[in-house]
Amino acid sequence: MKQNFLFQQLYEDQSSTFTYLLADSNTKEAVLIDTVIETVDRDLKLIEELGLKLIYVLDTHIHADHVTGAGEIRKRLGIKTAVPKKANVPCADLNLSEGDEIKFGEFTISTLETPGHTDASLSFYCEDMVFSGDALLIRGTGRTDFQSGSASELYDSVHKKLFTLPPSTTLYPAHDYKGFTSSSIAMEIKHNPRVGGGRTKEQFIQIMSELKLAYPKKIDQALPANFSCGTIGKDLGAEIKYKNISPSELQNRLGASLLVDVRENDEYTGELGHIQGSHLITLGESLKPFLEGYNRTEEIVFVCRSGNRSAIASQLAVELGFEKISNLEGGMLRWNELKFPVKK
Ligand SMILES: [Fe+2]
């Protein structure tokens, strides 16, 4: 490692998240990867003590277990935030895809697309280190059952992207729950019990399908907050002011509530279809003016593909003062799985 490469691994214990500080100690330019709202003060104090000039805050993916500190740090320091392009986060300054580079001082971070934990997850490679987010963990992987995750895609991301890095590359994930702090690509190829040790894609898909993990505790607050750069719903202890409803609850209420589908036009008319009577108002600029036309006591149910974008819309409606807001859990994916009627 070059002498002027400054590196610090930081930890947040509620969500077991690692935040990484990378800097060039000659030019003082610095970057943070995967910050947590609760530890923003600590991170900024460290940056100040070291005399660094923070220029970017990167997120490997849209986290479901904690709120990113990116928006708060941008507000305080005027830095640029960067997220995966495929995550569709309009408030971010940079939207990163495969091959995109972030420069600080004489160093460069290269972006690798490593989907599977979420459909938009990235890993960042810099100076023989890889920051893998939740794609590859130490002796584990991220879960693949939320946020359009896919075990098959994750296996390919790990095998075709991460496992093809130089074997000596140090692995720094976004989390660890067992006390590890780093690993190497060589060690994970050999010892990772899910994707290493010669396990096939079929074996990995089988392992992931049998995990039976609990619904992430903070997901309903963290996702809407993170899709808006961590600027809303910061208080994870706060009650959610909208209801999550199951497809069968919605089926029983059809006709009684205003149904708003916030997907894109081609999704609405695409293979998952849409629910009869739903209004298509794509999440974006047109949603607020549409809602303004309704009484704040109107019962509204928001729908999207998997329940993430509709959670953001629900949060927005609550902030506008609506009192009876519901979000369809699992979105049209779950609706279709349960074979409820769709219009195509
Ligand atoms: Fe994650």
Image: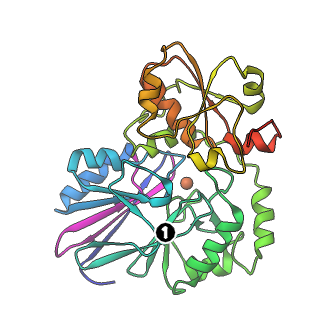
Query: Does the beta carbon at disc 1 come under 8 Å from ligand 1?
Result: no
- Compared to residue 118, the image places residue 331 above or below, namely above
- Range drawn in magenta: 15-36
Location of residue 94 in the rendering, given as x and y in whole percent from the top left corner: 35, 59
Q: Is residue 41 visible?
A: no
Callout 1 environment at 10 Å: few (<14), some (14 to 19), or many (20+)?
A: many
Front position in the image: 271 or 37 = 271
Quadrant field for ligand 1: bottom right
Q: How many marks?
A: 1
Judge left or right: residue 113 versus residue 1: right
Q: Residue at x 64, y 31 (%)?
A: 278
Give the quarter of the figure containing the C terminus. top right
Judging by the rendered image, the residue that carries numbered circle 1 is 123
Q: Is residue 269 visible?
A: yes
- Compared to residue 119, the image places residue 253 above or below, namely above
- Based on the picture, tell me whether residue 30 belongs to the magenta stretch: yes
Q: Residue at x 49, y 81 (%)?
A: 169
Front position in the image: 252 or 230 = 252
Give the quarter of the figure containing the N terminus. bottom left
Q: Residue at x 71, y 70 (%)?
A: 193
* Residue 211: quarter of image: bottom right
